Image: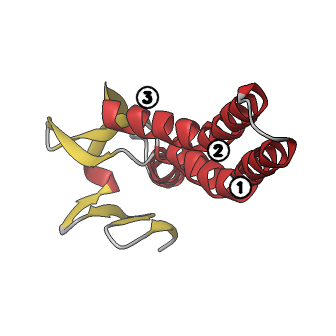
Amino acid sequence: MITYYDDRSVRVTSEAIRVGGRSYPLRGLARIWHRRGRRSWRSLAGRGALGAGILGPIIAAIVGIVVAVRLDASLSATVVLVAAACLVGLAAGPVADLLLEQLDRSYARGTHDLEIWADYGGRPVLLLHTRDALRFGQIYRALQRAVERGQPARTT
């Protein structure tokens, strides 16, 4: 038996796919297909918030510099305000690194519901439902490899 994919809830082997507590022998799968469901607006809103978080310190620094220059204050007060605004802008570097990492992970997770279906025993069965695009791709490809090596089930 060859294992093509294995995590805490899904296991794809040369003999079967196990999802949750259910096991489906590959010999019993007549056709396998995938479906992309509705978009998660919550994920998109999260990406927008991350983008705003990256730009926030930079915009705050620009506004601080403009206010410091337009303010009719002494030279030393203007220099202090400009320096403080620049420090706020410099804080964008480490913050941007953390937020860009989170943004990258959000793209790996995806924004759509993703499903793997199969005809099993003459009727369609939902094998997997996830929003994690990276994991979905790994499982679907593992299932394709297992089917290609073992039997004539058709994946679409």
Numbered disc 2: secondary structure: helix
Q: Name which residue lies at 71% across and 59% down.
A: 94
N-term-proximal mark, 2 vs 1: 2
Q: Which residue is mark 2?
A: 57
Regarding residue 32, the answer to whether it shows in the image is no
Q: Give the CA distance from mark 3 to mark 2.
A: 47 Å
Q: Amino acid at mark 1?
A: Ala
Q: Nearer the viewer, residue 56 or 34?
A: 56
Q: Residues within 10 Å of mark 2 (few under 14, many from 20)?
A: many
Question: Tag on residue 91?
Answer: 1
Q: Amino acid at mark 3?
A: Thr
Q: At which x and y percent is residue 130? A: 33, 47
N-term-proximal mark, 1 vs 3: 1
Numbered disc 1: secondary structure: loop
Q: Nearer the viewer, residue 54 or 106?
A: 54
The quarter holding residue 13 reads: bottom left
Q: Which residue is mark 3?
A: 156
